[in-house]
Image (cartoon, rainbow, N blue to C red):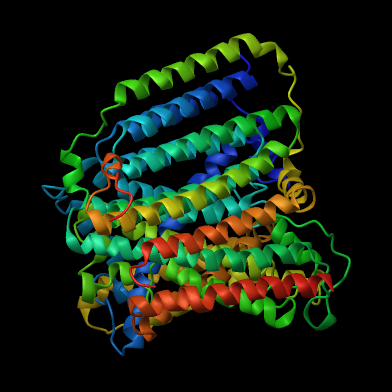
Amino acid sequence: MADFSNYLNSNLTPGQAGAHLWVVIYILIIFAAVSLAVIAMNWLERKILAHMQVRLGPMRVGPHGLLQPIADALKLLIKEDIIPENADKLVFWMAPLVVVITAFTTYIVIPFGPTHAVTDMNIGILFMLGVASLGTLGIIMAGWASNSHYPLLGSLRSSAQMVSYEVAMGMAAVSAILMTSLRGTGVYGIGSPTADAIGTLSMIEIVRAQMNQHVWFVFKFFPLGLAAFGIFAIAMVAETNRAPFDLPEAESELTAGFHTEYSGFRWSLFFLAEYAAMIAVSSIAVTLWLGGWLRPFPHWLSGDAWDTAFSIFPAFTFFVLAGMALRTTVRMPKHPYFKIQKAGLGVFGLLLGGIGLVLLVPPVRDRVQDIYWFAIKVAAFMYLYIWYRGTFPRYRFDQLMRLGWKFMIPTGIGVLIATALVGVL
Amino acid sequence: MEITTLHYLVVASALFIIGTIGVLTRRNVIIILMSIELILNAVNLNLVAFSRLYGLQGQVFSIFVITDAAAEAAVGLGILIAFFRNKETINADEIDLLKF
Amino acid sequence: MDPVATPYFFYGLSAVAVLSAVGVIMRRNPVHSAIALIFTLLSLAGLYLMLYAPFVAGVQIILYVGGIVVLFLFVIMLINIERMQREYQFNKQWLVGLLAAAALGALFVAVYVKGQSIFPQHAVRFPEQLNTQQVGKMLYVDYLLPFEIASLLLLVAIVGAVVMAKKRI
């Protein structure tokens, strides 16, 4: 028990401190938070897509469709679970598990803050890329085990696509890892040239390197960091099978691709894993290029006043959300039919405001603001995912392969070589 | 009981023998290639286990072995696809013509 | 921090590795073999972690499981396996092969029983935190020529695979 309370004062991750109970607590918190984020993403994606197409989106279940994801989840859970007659039962059963387990395993090294990670591995980024690439296996297994034409085609496409884009992704990631060891002068000569010269693969150390070098790696060696980031940002969309690279599940060509034969709970596992993987891959991008948990301008705008100002942001965000909810409550139609919805939305708004008030308490404020900055950067990527889906038409498969092999990989290698050259000179 | 290097060597030799049996007895070329992967992995385990005793050279060499395995799998599967296109079979004992 | 429950992890991982290796060579269906191979490779990665070789473990996962096995599965799906599953799975020399492998096993056992004493008793404890840096340094300083040869080998393999698999060049 002493260990349990002592950990609160340490500045290590629970895995490094050897606090096993805290490891379990962190894992549970992350699991719950990611599941919640997936539910929120489900609602947001439908709403945002609808508004992009000048529709309203879900409006019926709960005020502004807020309870729609819960209704969907209930529907999926009580749906009949079908296994096709000629399917390979064992592999069919294993595939969704593999996809979910790999998507969630990556979270143990994601640094939500200097101490807010389950553990810090010295091969962190290698581990993340490796485990993320295992997700392909689950998709291949699902497509093959269904014993049907569309899923098989979908999984063939998926394996070819993922193997190709993994290379580009790796090249981009390597050039960011290389930057941790290079003493460059940062963006336009603002940074300090005193950072240490030992590179690292650990996620936490990568963010610390950006801190010490006074620059986010997306701005380092100006066009090079940005180019590597761009390659990664494209490759990660292909890696998670999202539009415009969603060929493995292209509904107009392959009905639903690799998960055509899945229904009910198993299908919802695929859904959960897809969104969890999106968040995980975005977290890699945020950690490598966008400074992880660092707030904007930690050196330029330093000092107690600025620290306090920036640490109010999380509470402020929740107050804005609460204000939006309450404003909508007031503007609800007067008809008695909307009575329950009005009360529900009001309580929801007050709940958000309450969370905002809790976040204002100084000890909570200090522990939470790292997580907030990390989450807001990941959220920007999530919005981009939805935006891509609303904007771009789907690629044809040969165009996809041409983009991967003939543009992204050569550019990735070029950026890597240029980064090494610039860093050494 | 403490785990010594010998324990790892026993596991490695078990994998090596299983791989050998696979190469010697199976007809399917894909399974034979997989058995070769097993053999290479047994070798890797040996190298890494010995690197505990003698220094990091073992680990460096095991990375070379993994590279070699990747090259071998790529070329082997390429030959396999070419063969399947011509003969509609992938059984090792039917690959007995020098020219077709 | 000391590793937790090391013997149990060792026996568990080795059991998974050996049993799924048996699965690789015994299954009739190549896809099942490939999945068993994944389990072997992953548990070997775990054993590497126990041997304080985290970098090799990472490379094992990303290259073997994420690359080579996916390649295997891809090729298995391109090839019609329905017919092969109904044929004999073992060739005519299976008895000879088994005997040869048994002889090899006997040789291993003999070597381990006789030569047990020549290993140093105490393992060197590497600083685990610096493993990647040390491996990298050794790879690029001491073993630069083998490294270049390996890259040449990969180039040859790429060209060879394309030449083999493409219908018309």
When the figure is inspected, residue A115 is found, relative to residue A6, above or below; the finding is below
In the rendered view of the protein, which quadrant contains the C terminus of chain A? bottom right
When the figure is inspected, residue A293 is found, relative to residue B76, above or below; the finding is below
- Residue A174's spot in the image, x, y percent? 64, 63
Q: Nearer the viewer, residue B53 or A217?
A: B53
- Residue A262's spot in the image, x, y percent? 21, 56
Query: Which residue is depicted at the point 80% across and 66% down?
Result: A182
- Residue C77's spot in the image, x, y percent? 28, 55
Query: Which residue is depicted at the point 37% across and 75% down?
Result: A243
Q: Which of A9 and C27 is in front in this view?
A: C27
On screen, residue A97 versus residue A125, left or right, reads: left
Question: Do we see residue A267 in this rendering?
Answer: no
On screen, residue C133 versus residue A102, left or right, reads: right
Q: Nearer the viewer, residue A215 or A122?
A: A122
In the rendered view of the protein, which quadrant contains the N terminus of chain A? top right
Q: Nearer the viewer, residue C74 or A187?
A: C74
Query: Which residue is depicted at the point 68% across and 43% down?
Result: B60
Question: Do we see residue A113 in this rendering?
Answer: yes
- Residue A295's spot in the image, x, y percent? 69, 70
On screen, residue A347 versus residue C29, left or right, reads: right
